[in-house]
Image (spheres, helix red, strand yellow):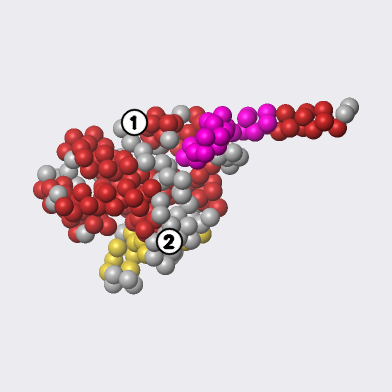
């Protein structure tokens, strides 16, 4: 067989393999040809999540259940890569297991799923206590903490309680990872879409008295009015747990939040268009 034919055969086989494993190779190739970045969710070789983990997410996570098969593959891959990039450490007598790590990782992946950067590179360690813990930074007992030294800390009792009611707009996982997402992007020396849309979001919040309005209307809990960072974290909680109420009460703020996170929890199918 001529060398050219062998080369063509090998190239064809490689292309077929890539097409099988790719989430949406065709769209990525088209974007490449016209000098556009590939879709946000695109991964050429997505990592696989175990069947037990997938079954757990399908059973316990409505957000995951609403994703299309190809978006689930991307979500699974992001969870695996997030876990591989972090140290999960237990404190006290708390026993860490794979299910707990999966649940924590899925919260981080969920709020960053519309973004290209989902590994929170500024943060290297996630510490889990069984209950509230003493914070050296704030010098008080707390349920969670995020600091710029690269550590996110959770009380598992409160993390689990936040997940147990997906409609009360109180979710420790979303809250602390929202802080981490904010710090990761705002401390980056590079310009990105998150920064651009967050500045627009913040200007709207500050110059339209949205901190006061959101709490006075009882759309957000009072803690949201503490400062802009806490307002953003509470907004993320509401965005994922009470999106209808959020959109009805503060439609413009909801629209801007969708731009910041590059997703709409009321329309998960839009992720396929990114």
Give the side of residue 42 with respect to residue 21, left or right.
left
The quadrant of the rendering that contains the C terminus is top left
Q: In this view, does 78 lie above or below 142?
A: above
Which residue is denoted by mark 2 in the rendering?
189
Q: In the rendered structure, does residue 34 fall within the stretch colored magenta?
A: yes
* The quadrant where residue 273 appears: top left
Magenta residues? 15-42
Can residue 264 be seen here? yes
* Along the line of sight, the residue nearer the viewer: 146 or 51: 146
Tell me what residue is drawn at x 65 percent, y 33 percent: 18
Q: Report the number of discs.
A: 2
Q: Is mark 1 on a helix, strand or loop?
A: loop
Tell me what residue is drawn at x 79 percent, y 33 percent: 7
* Along the line of sight, the residue nearer the viewer: 76 or 210: 210
Give the side of residue 37 with respect to residue 141, left or right.
right
* Along the line of sight, the residue nearer the viewer: 77 or 269: 269
Q: Which residue lies furthest to the left in this view?
A: 216
Tell me what residue is drawn at x 78 percent, y 28 percent: 9
- The x and y percentages for residue 188 are 42, 59
- The x and y percentages for residue 63 are 38, 35
């Amino acid at each position: 067989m001529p060398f050219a034919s062998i080369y063509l055969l090998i190239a064809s086989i490689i292309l077929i393999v890539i097409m099988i494993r790719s989430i949406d190779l065709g769209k990525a190739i088209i974007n490449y040809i016209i000098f556009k970045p590939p879709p946000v969710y695109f991964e050429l070789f997505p990592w696989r999540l175990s069947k037990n983990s997938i079954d757990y997410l399908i059973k316990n996570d409505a957000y995951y259940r609403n994703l299309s098969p190809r978006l689930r593959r991307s979500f699974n891959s992001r969870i695996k890569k997030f876990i591989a990039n972090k140290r999960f450490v237990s404190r006290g007598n708390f026993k860490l297991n794979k299910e707990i790590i999966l649940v924590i990782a899925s919260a981080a992946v969920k709020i960053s799923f519309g973004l290209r950067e989902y590994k929170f590179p500024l943060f290297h360690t996630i510490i889990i206590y069984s209950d509230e813990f003493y914070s050296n930074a704030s010098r008080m007992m707390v349920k969670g903490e995020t600091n710029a030294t690269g550590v996110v800390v959770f009380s598992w009792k409160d993390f689990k309680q936040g997940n147990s009611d997906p409609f009360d707009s109180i979710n420790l996982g979303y809250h602390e990872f929202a802080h981490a997402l904010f710090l990761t992007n705002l401390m980056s020396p590079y310009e990105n879409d998150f920064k651009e849309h967050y500045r627009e979001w913040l200007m709207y919040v500050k110059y339209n008295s949205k901190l006061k309005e959101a709490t006075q209307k009882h759309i957000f809990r009072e803690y949201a009015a503490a400062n802009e960072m806490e307002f953003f974290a509470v907004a993320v909680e509401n965005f994922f747990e009470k999106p209808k109420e959020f959109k009805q009460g503060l439609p413009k703020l909801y629209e801007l939040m969708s731009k910041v996170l590059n997703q709409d929890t009321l329309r998960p199918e839009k992720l396929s268009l990114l």
